[in-house]
Amino acid sequence: MKAAKDKPVIVAGGGLGGLSVALALGQAGHCVQVLEQAPEIAPIGYGIQLGPNVLKAFSQLGLASIVKAACDYPQSLVMPDAESGDVLLRIPLNGEAYIQRFGEPYIVIHRSAIHDILLEACSRQEGVELIVNSQVDNFRDEGEDGVSVTTTDGRRFEGSALIGADGVKSRIRALIQGETAPRDTGYVAHRTVMPMSQTPAGLPHLQDVVLWSGPGYHVVHYPLNQGTVFNAVAVFRNPAPGVEDPKQYVAQVQQVYGAAHPSLKKVIELMDLQKRWPLADRDPFRTWSCGRVTLLGDAVHPTLQSYGQGAGMAVEDAVCLAGLVNDSGGDFEKAFAEYPKRRLVRSARIQLGSRHLWEFYHAEGIAREVRNAELKERTDQSFYDCLSWIWDGDPMSGMPLTVQKSDGRSAEALA
């Protein structure tokens, strides 16, 4: 049996977090095997938002300029009341004051685009191997000999360490902690992407990230692909739990947004309300690592979308974890033990804060009136101050600013 140091790091999951940590470790000279359960490592999903903190993490991976070239730059974050249409807040993004404050812009991008950028970088990175049709079933920590991983089809892989980046229903998390169900929020999401030319005439705020805030529901939309695509998600407190009949379910949803502003109604009417995704998260927990095995991204801290930071936290995890492995001289047990100490409070603050903000978005009755009045009193600077703990980036990250190649050139220059 090979010594652990001669074996690759095994990453379970080929999503944004898994590819990010594979790339970061590969750039630092480690061999990595990414085990993806799907037949191909292919992008899925719709648009995502990435704050300045995420671009700083991508800069550490040498990919910031490529990401910026593929994204859209919304002018503002706008929150209208879903019924009156009154703008409750407008936070300028990407202007001189914003860039000066946070160092990077706020961007939106199709998940497939960011996934393709990472996939291409990993495919070019020496030492990174992508293996599909490989769903992890079990693992064994072999101590100084590393780890062994078996897949559902009976194959066995040997590695120096295992990183579980396999999502909210993580098999690796279940093996470490025991199987538990995610926390059902009682909300469901409906998503759509369409050509901008098909959007309702006169729809306001088309160049912004817009969050229409209503009693028991909200709708987010923004442009993608240089303004040619309209991305929207509508989230409702499930008005018909257990109802399977699509027409009956849609009728219940229509009652929920019956008092919505005419412009918002037109957006919702463009969406397929028969197809819905239940929304779930998990409570924060401390046991991220066990010997040479650890967790990353949604496998350890799945969050609601309130802050738009789910993907961002996974990328931050990746650069922090790779940096700790470097700092430890390849001592995975030491690095994996330190890793949650660096990331737990920040990620838990995102999780718990997202729950609080979730209720804030969906306030009803007098609470909604009070919220609206408070928001109208806020200034741009006060919003920046409120969100700076997120957008400033992770102060505990263990990665150097830019990963250096062996010939001294940065990864950004080689990308």
Image (tube, rainbow, N blue to C red):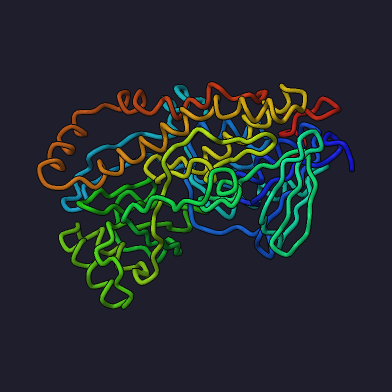
Query: Residue 51 location in percent, x, y?
Result: 48, 36
Query: Residue 7 location in percent, x, y?
Result: 83, 40
Query: Going by the image, does 102 lie left or right of 41?
Result: left
Is the residue 130 above or below the residue 78 in the image? below
Is the residue 410 above or below the residue 200 in the image? above
The N terminus, quarter of image: top right
Query: Going by the image, does 370 lie left or right of 123?
Result: left
Residue 261 position by quadrant: bottom left
Q: Residue sitting at 60 percent across and 42 percent down?
A: 67
The C terminus, quarter of image: top right
State the residue lying farthest toward the right: 1
State the residue lying farthest toward the left: 366
Q: Nearer the viewer, residue 121 or 365?
A: 365
Q: Nearer the viewer, residue 145 or 253?
A: 145
Q: Nearer the viewer, residue 69 or 158?
A: 158
Query: Residue 352 location in percent, x, y?
Result: 37, 36
Query: Going by the image, does 221 lie left or right of 343?
Result: left
